[in-house]
Image (tube, helix red, strand yellow):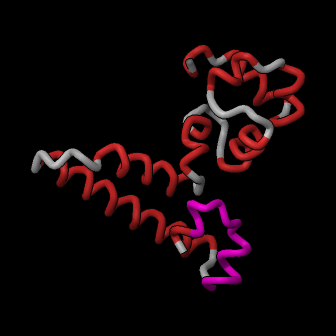
Amino acid sequence: MLNSWIDEVEEDALLEKYNVTPGELHVKLTTADWLLYAAHEIGRITHHTEYQKELMDLRVRLKHGVKRELLPLVSLKNVGRVRARKLFDRGIKNAADIAKCNIKVLEKIVGKKTAVGLKGDRNFL
């Protein structure tokens, strides 16, 4: 079920396939996040740091329910799994692409308010 979530399967499909409600999904995601955090900390404490980046990436993927390719986008303010997928599918893969993108094109993809916020947010580069 968690693999389906990070493969961007929608909640309705998860309910049908795994019989898991949004509330149950949230609980499972919270538990998985805690376990990944614990694994990360154990690795740090024991100096086994070879998987630290992968563990942190997986935590972000679980939080947002996205494939690895969307990580640069979901790190931006007001960009979640749906907006990130829309941007990515239109060739906008990271903050640098957003900076180069025409504001009108960006507005059509994510809406005016979000587009203005993304273009005005100088912290994304």
Left or right relative to 121: residue 34: left
Q: Residue at x 63, y 21 (%)?
A: 96
The C terminus: image quadrant: top right
Relative to 40, residue 16 above or below: below
* Image coords of residue 14 (percent x, y): 65, 75
Prevailing secondary structure class for the magenta stretch in the rendered image? helix
Residue 38 is a magenta residue: no
- For the record, the magenta segment spans 4-19
The residue shown at (62%, 25%) is: 95
The residue at the far left in this view is 46
- In the displayed structure, 9 sits above or below 74; it is below
Q: In which quarter of the view is residue 11 placed? A: bottom right
Q: Position of residue 20 (x, y in %)?
A: 60, 80
In the displayed structure, 45 sits above or below 19; it is above
* Number of numbered discs overlaid on the protein picture: 0
Residue 111 in the image: state x and y as whole percent: 84, 33
8 part of magenta stretch: yes
Quadrant where the N terminus sits is bottom right
* Residue displayed at 66% across by 83% down: 17
Q: Nearer the viewer, residue 89 or 39?
A: 89
In this view of the protein, which residue sits in the foreground, 75 or 52?
52
The residue under the point 86% across, 28% down is 107
